[in-house]
Amino acid sequence: MADEHFHRWIQSLETRHLADLTFSEVSRALRALSSTYVERRRRLTERSALAGAGKRAAFALFYGPLHYLLVREIVRALPGAAVGSPTLVDLGCGTGASGVAWAYECSRRPRVVGVDRHPWVLGEAARAYRHFGLSARICHDEVASVSLPKPPASLLAAFTLNELQDAPRDGLLRRLVERTSRGDQVLIVEPIARLAARWWNKWRDIFVTAGGRGDEWRFRVDLPAIVAKLDRAAGLDHRELTGRSLWLSP
Ligand SMILES: C[S@@+](CC[C@H](N)C(=O)[O-])C[C@H]1O[C@@H](n2cnc3c(N)ncnc32)[C@H](O)[C@@H]1O
């Protein structure tokens, strides 16, 4: 059932995002977007990453599904992660992909709150939540200062913390770790990239000392046809998905 929803979601993304753009326009935009993300990540601003229809289409149609698949596999692999909570807050929800993946793996589907400061991605996230039949709300706010729901909640930040400055990131992580003593679960996901996360080791140690874990993951997954085609056309190779996570639960 989850797979069916996932495949129908990919089809709807493909139909919408390839309605006004050709495949080669999107794959060209994907090449530019992936160089922004991977090679110049430290100079990334959301404005440059999501400027223009081509990059938005590439983000929604390529990175969204990849993030969904990676987070789904991580949640399946982390004991207790699929138990879930009444509310799941997706901090920096983007197009909603990672939050949907976690929510959909939970034995009792949580209500989802997608938080982002970019209006365009919030529209995409709202569509994704609707598509998967999740009870959800979008919230246009800053992740570092947004107010969090009453515990217990599942708190997710996937591919977001790297975009924050050091001080707000440290403040948010401190707040998330504190919330686990009130019953929340916290999952942080980032790419494996030496230069992309200098702050990682410090926070991995804090999570581990608090009873949590830090993992690096490699998963072989079947990519949806359009994602595999974009991957090849942009000279990328995501037949193996990689990522790292921090996990802490009460
Ligand atoms: C790389 S995307 C990841 C999106 C999504 N979590 C996923 O896994 O696909 C990072 C998202 O974080 C959002 N973001 C970055 N800094 C933010 C901030 N300070 N407050 C709110 N959203 C932020 C961006 O607008 C973007 O949508």
Image (tube, grey):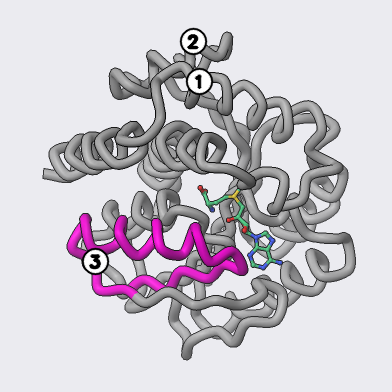
Residue of label 2: 233
Question: Is residue 228 depicted above or below 14 in this figure?
Answer: above
Report the residue at 39% width, 23% height from top.
22
Horizontal arrangement in the rendering, residue 79 relative to residue 164 (left or right): left
Report the residue at 62% width, 33% height from top.
216
Q: Amino acid at mark 1?
A: Ser
Where in the figure is residue 170, as x and y percent of width and height? 82, 67
The secondary element bearing badge 2 is classed as helix
Residue of label 1: 27
Q: Point out the stretch of residues depicted in magenta.
A: 112-136
Out of 178 and 42, give the one closest to the viewer: 42
Where in the figure is residue 145, as x and y percent of width and height? 70, 81
Q: Residues within 10 Å of mark 1 (few under 14, many from 20)?
A: many
The alpha-carbon separation of the residues under discs 2 and 1 comes to 6 Å
Asked if the magenta segment contains residue 133, the reply would be: yes
Q: Amino acid at mark 2?
A: Ala
Q: Earlier in the sequence, mark 3 or mark 1?
A: 1
